[in-house]
Image (cartoon, rainbow, N blue to C red):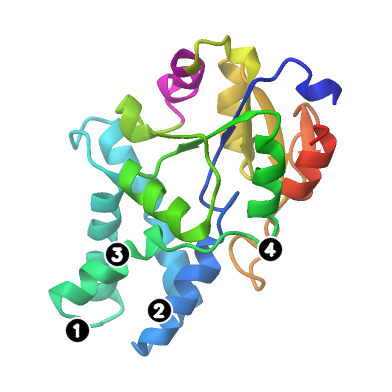
Amino acid sequence: MEAGQDTEVLAFDVFGTVVDWHGSIAREVDALGLGVDGGEFALAWRAGYKPAMQRVQSGELGWTRLDDLHRGILDELLERFAITSLSEADKRHLNRVWHRLDPWPDAVEGLTRLKRRFTLCTLSNGNLGLLTNMAKRAGLPWDCILSAEVFRQYKPHPATYLGVGEVFDVPPAAVMMVAAHQEDLDSARRQGLRAAYVERPHEFGVATSKDASGALDNDLHTTSLIDLAERLGC
């Protein structure tokens, strides 16, 4: 309770923290019967995520939605994996798998409990349409969807973190960033936000280990969103 005493807004990273991107993409790719391992394909797709955003952050590209960055990565992967059987409509549908990611089992219950006390928003690099479609399909009970698209800056640009407080007219310290990625929390804390780490040891699949220890100076360290709700008195 003490860590969230003055917190008004919980801002959530989404990919990996709230939804299982690896498992969702692996299942869908495997179901397509493309002759590739779905888990390997999912990891390769995600590996292109930061380099693609860096092209925007460096000014090499103008503002580009994540959907469009994802499509560019997908086209490269289809060539790398020698997949030639997909029509243009198939490619568009596959690219929108990021709109259809399944929530972690604790996500909906945890968010629903947290919503009783706090304002909940996303703070994701996903674009607005992607996050809205995902929430509708998965039943994620956000009060507000905020995105890098709103601020025209991808995380970890300070404008994304500071933008949450500006939207809700609260100081940065009244916002708690919730994420399964320590670098996201470190960036948020540098801008004066509080930080809650959520363990997602299988974010990259059960066969790929992930350090889920977090940092000792986070405000909270939790094992799930239900655990976060309990720690914050919800």
N-terminal of the pair, mark 2 or mark 1, is: 2
Write down the residue under mark 3.
Answer: 95
12 horizontally vs 135: left or right: right
Q: Which mark is residue 29?
A: 2
Under circle 4, the secondary element is loop
- Give the total number of marks visible in the rendering: 4
Q: Do residues under tags 4 and 2 come within 8 Å of each other at their CB atoms?
A: no
Q: Position of residue 135 (x, y in %)?
A: 46, 51
Marks 1 and 4 sit apart, C-alpha to C-alpha, by 32 Å
Write down the residue under mark 4.
Answer: 209
- The residue positioned 64% from the left and 67% from the top of the image is 208
Q: Which mark is residue 69?
A: none
Marks 2 and 3 sit apart, C-alpha to C-alpha, by 11 Å
**Residue nearest the observer in this picture, 201 or 171:** 171
Disc 4 crowd rating (10 Å Cα; few below 14, some 14-19, many 20+) is few
89 horizontally vs 143: left or right: left
Q: Which residues are magenta?
A: 156-167
Write down the residue under mark 1.
Answer: 84
Residue 166 lies in the magenta-colored region? yes
Disc 2 crowd rating (10 Å Cα; few below 14, some 14-19, many 20+) is many
Q: Position of residue 212 (x, y in %)?
A: 73, 50
Closer to the camera: disc 3 or disc 1?
3
Disc 3 crowd rating (10 Å Cα; few below 14, some 14-19, many 20+) is many
- The residue positioned 33% from the left and 29% from the top of the image is 150
**Residue nearest the observer in this picture, 106 or 210:** 106
Under circle 2, the secondary element is helix
